[in-house]
Image: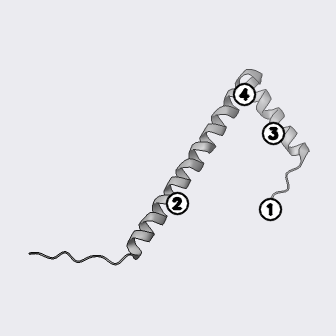
Amino acid sequence: MFNVGPGEIAIVFGLALLIFGPKKLPELGKALGQGIGNFKRSLTEAQSEMATAIKDSDKPEEKSKIS
């Protein structure tokens, strides 16, 4: 789909360096990494909950008896 080469990556990195400066760039990278990690963790939890809900819905329900 997108063919990104080393030239394009260097241009994006250079622009980010000019905009944010050399001191802020590592902080932004760390924040981006943490955000991606949190997103992946949330996605895994949601998939697990959906799988559990589907598994539970496949079980036949027990009818309660009033004695």
Mark 1 in CB contact with mark 2 (< 8 angstroms): no
Mark toward the viewer: 4 or 1: 4
Amino acid type, label 2: Gln
* Amino acid identity at mark 4: Pro
Q: Which residue is mark 1?
A: 1
Give the answer, above or below, for where 26 lies relative to 33: above
Q: Residue at x 11, y 75 (%)?
A: 66
Q: Position of residue 3 (x, y in %)?
A: 85, 56
- Earlier residue among tags 3 and 1: 1
Residue closer to the observer: 43 or 32: 43
Q: Position of residue 15 (x, y in %)?
A: 80, 34
As measured in the structure, the alpha-carbon distance from the residue carrying label 4 to the one carrying label 1 is 29 Å
Amino acid type of the residue tagged 1 in the rendering? Met
Counting from the top left corner in percent of width and height, residue 59 is at: 38, 75
Is the residue marked by circle 3 packed among few (<14), some (14-19), or many (20+) residues within 10 Å?
Answer: few
Q: Quadrant of residue 21?
A: top right
Label 2, on which residue?
A: 47
Q: Nearer the viewer, mark 2 or mark 3?
A: 2
**Where is residue 61, by image quadrant?**
bottom left
Query: Viewer-proximal residue, 32 or 41?
Result: 41
Instruction: Give the colour scheme shown.
Output: one colour
Say which mark, if any, is on residue 59. Answer: none
Q: Looking at this rendering, what residue extends furthest in the left direction?
A: 67
Residue on which the image places disc 4: 26
